């Protein structure tokens, strides 16, 4: 085979791709590794999708997801120009890096800026948080600046903020509630953080439906704040890839300029529209997931796990006796898949998606069997 690697840009050659959670095809597997919702989409959504499967698949979908944006605007009390829809919120996070952050200049890359940090090149985020952010920064050739969260994954205290935080960073991502820890943040503290920030801030609220409060209002109040939402986690629609941002029309218009013309597939638009017409179904699911989360947290604690309070549809736990990675393997042998991150700050923990009550009972039974053996 002739080699072609030299034809690839050096930046891309050196890139480490984002590692998504596994989607293995193992029969009977209990899949608690990627925070999918254990409950199916509403019957109305399935019916709308079924009704759309005909000759119209040959046509392009609405290029601006107009109906969906109007429905989202009604639902959040804003205007369609405050809303952009993406192929999952992941697409919009990537567009934001391209729209708001300069790729590193050659001088900056060679360190010829006299050591001065140039915030125009900076994508900033807390660690740990969504592991896609540094990958997006690297892909763009921007500078990734991870700032460590405080104890129990709280927002950092004044000294870390003074010494490490960049108030001028071109773009800042805040996962709220935090992933992978599940910690929720008060809107008041997020507002204080946003008010001090001069660059764009994205509040990534992928898990807001499982939380006691959300900060959507900040996206409509502060001109430099965008709020990211997704139909994936709360609305059982990972497969369809639909997410959106809410915020200032000028920032939204900038993202709109650089997206693909048909970035949101037609079936995704139909599914998301039907989702918004059956809110009651999903609100009942949020309640079920939250109740299962609280029960599972108590039982895992009883079994000797350290469990962090969660405002999301997963638990972040420090398991007893064995290393977290060994727990991952032991559970996998019993056909239960959870998530383990190899990074320094996460390697002692497991992240466990909340499944149905029955699935969590099987998880709990498996943990007891593992503990009885060691
Ligand atoms: C799952 C997740 C997303 C991505 O959601 P999609 O809409 O499926 O792309 C974004 N941010 C965080 C923090 C997530 O956990």
Image: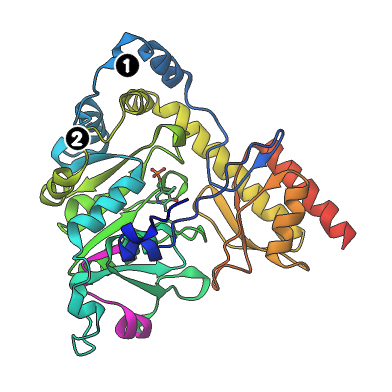
In the image, residue 269 above or below residue 97? above
Whether residue 230 is visible to the viewer of this picture, yes or no, is yes
Does residue 283 appear left or right of residue 255 in this picture? right
Estimate how packed mark 1 is, as few (under 14), some (14 to 19) or many (20 or more) residues with alpha carbons within 10 Å. Answer: few
Residue drawn at point x = 13 percent, y = 44 percent: 257
Quadrant assignment, res 148: bottom left
Q: Point out the tag, 1 or 2, that comes first from the N-terminus.
A: 1
Task: Name the outermost residue toward the front.
Answer: 2
| Number of the label disc, if any, that sits on residue 261 | 2
Residue drawn at point x = 15 percent, y = 52 percent: 251
In the image, residue 232 above or below residue 277? below
Secondary structure under tag 1 reads helix
Task: Name the outermost residue toward the left.
Answer: 250
In the image, residue 26 above or below residue 183? above
Determine whether label 1 and label 2 are within 8 Å by CB: no
From the Cβ of disc 1, is ligand 1 less than 8 Å away? Answer: no
Question: Is residue 165 located in the magenta-colored stretch of the structure?
Answer: yes
Task: Name the outermost residue toward the bottom.
Answer: 114
Q: Nearer the viewer, residue 299 or 339?
A: 339
Residue drawn at point x = 18 percent, y = 65 percent: 102
Residue 217 in the image: state x and y as whole percent. 25, 50
């Amino acid at each position: 085979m002739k080699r072609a690697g030299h034809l690839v840009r050096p930046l891309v050659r050196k890139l480490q791709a984002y590692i998504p959670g596994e989607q293995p095809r193992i029969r009977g597997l209990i899949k608690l590794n990627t925070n999918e919702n254990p409950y199916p989409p509403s019957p109305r959504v399935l019916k709308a999708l079924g009704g759309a499967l005909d000759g119209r698949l040959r046509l392009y979908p609405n290029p601006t997801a107009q109906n969906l944006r109007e429905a989202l605007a009604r639902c959040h009390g804003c205007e369609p120009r405050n809303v952009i829809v993406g192929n999952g919120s992941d697409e919009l996070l990537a567009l934001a890096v391209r729209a708001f952050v300069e790729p590193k200049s050659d001088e900056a890359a060679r360190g010829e800026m006299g050591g001065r940090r140039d915030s125009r090149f900076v994508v900033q985020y807390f660690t740990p948080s969504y592991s896609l952010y540094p990958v997006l920064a690297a892909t763009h050739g921007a500078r990734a600046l991870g700032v460590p969260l405080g104890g129990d994954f709280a927002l950092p205290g004044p000294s870390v903020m003074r010494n490490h935080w960049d108030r001028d960073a071109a773009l800042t991502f805040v996962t709220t509630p935090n992933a992978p820890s599940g910690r929720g943040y008060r809107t008041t503290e997020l507002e204080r953080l946003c008010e001090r920030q001069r660059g764009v801030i994205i509040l990534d609220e992928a898990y807001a439906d499982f939380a006691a409060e959300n900060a959507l209002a900040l996206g409509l109040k502060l001109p430099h704040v965008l709020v990211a939402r997704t139909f994936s986690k709360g609305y059982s629609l990972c497969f369809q890839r639909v997410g959106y941002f809410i915020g200032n029309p000028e920032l939204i218009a900038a993202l709109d300029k650089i997206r693909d013309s048909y970035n949101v597939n037609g079936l995704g638009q139909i599914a998301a529209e039907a989702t918004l017409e059956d809110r009651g179904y999903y609100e009942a699911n949020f309640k079920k997931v939250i109740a299962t989360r609280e029960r599972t947290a108590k039982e895992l604690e009883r079994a000797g796990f350290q469990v962090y309070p969660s405002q999301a549809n997963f638990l972040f736990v420090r398991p007893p006796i064995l290393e977290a990675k060994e727990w991952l393997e032991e559970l996998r042998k019993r056909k239960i898949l959870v998530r383990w991150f190899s990074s320094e700050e996460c390697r002692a923990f497991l992240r466990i998606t909340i499944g149905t009550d029955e699935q969590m009972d099987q998880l709990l039974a498996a943990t007891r069997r593992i503990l009885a053996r060691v």
